[in-house]
Amino acid sequence: MELLASDAVQPDRAVVVVTHDSRVFHHAQSISRMDDGRIVDVSRPNGSVREDIEEVDSFHKEAVL
Amino acid sequence: MESNGHAIWCHDIQKHYGEGETRIDALRGVDFKARFGELSFLVGPSGCGKTTLLCVIAGLLDRSGGDLTVLGQNLDGLSDGDRVLFRRKNLGFVFQQYNLLPALTAAENVAVPLPRPRFRAKRRWIAPGPSCRGSGSKDASRRFPPSFPAASNNASRSPGLSFTSRGSSYATSQRRPWTMRRVRP
């Protein structure tokens, strides 16, 4: 996981990890929770707030509705 | 463009299997974004659609609806052949069950997808990069699959898969794709 995390920190790369293992969550810049075919929550555990968060949250609200 | 700053941009992605009474809606309008330079996690209970979403993003599954841009590219406009080339050049999967060829070493497994005409078989595995070495081990590149840990490392026993994508800049630059740079001829 350290290897993936270090690889992701490149301006031309992105890494998406599907996991059930909460022990590795601290590596994530963004955690999207899915349930029944929808994204029901998006969080950024490291506190790195980006300007698109509100937009994502509005998506989330629509998805929950 | 909506996908600016995002390696992956999904809006209202739908995916269903079957029709009528047997129809199963695996994705019911997914909005998902992954920024360049970030590690994004997809979590949720089994069967919630995580792997389906990943396969749709990677072009391994056709979606039933919604908009999708990967590395600035709308894959809908590509032929099947071009989509395969796009995947080979820009996208990588690391499965938890890693489907490695047991007769090949770690480095040789990494070299399998490299274009054969440009890399002679003898030279394809000579200089494996850090991805082959595993965490904590001196050099696992010449070991065979049963003796080295899962790709993500053995501290993670998660049941899912991880999916790495590399930037669109490779498509327009002279740089060699990541895998090739790590397995130098």
Image (spheres, coloured by chain):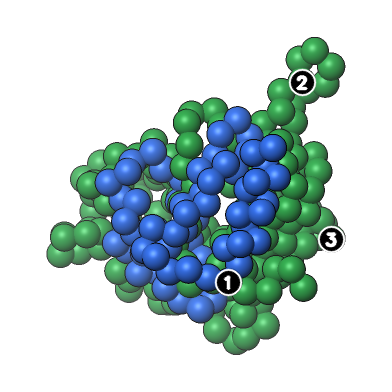
Residue of label 3: B77
Q: Secondary structure at mark 1?
A: loop
Q: Residue furthest bottom?
A: B174
Out of B41 and B174, give the one closest to the viewer.
B41
Colour for chain B in the figure? green
Out of A33 and B83, give the one closest to the viewer.
A33
Mark 2 or mark 1: which is in front? Answer: 1
Task: Name which of mark 2 and mark 3 comes first in the sequence.
Answer: 2
Q: Is residue B118 left or right of residue B161?
A: right
| Relative vertical location of residue B82 with respect to residue B118 in this rendering, above or below | above
Residue B23 image label: 2
Tell me which amino acid carries mark 2. Arg
Asked whether residue B118 is in view, the answer is no
Circle 1: is it few (<14), some (14-19), or many (20+) Cα within 10 Å? few
Circle 2/circle 1 CB separation < 8 Å: no
- Chain letter, colour blue in render: A
Disc 3 and disc 1 on one polypeptide chain: no
Which chain is disc 1 placed on?
A: A
Mark 3 or mark 1: which is in front? Answer: 1
Separation of disc 2 and disc 3 at Cα?
27 Å
Residue A51 image label: 1
Q: Residue at x 42, y 73 (%)?
A: A9
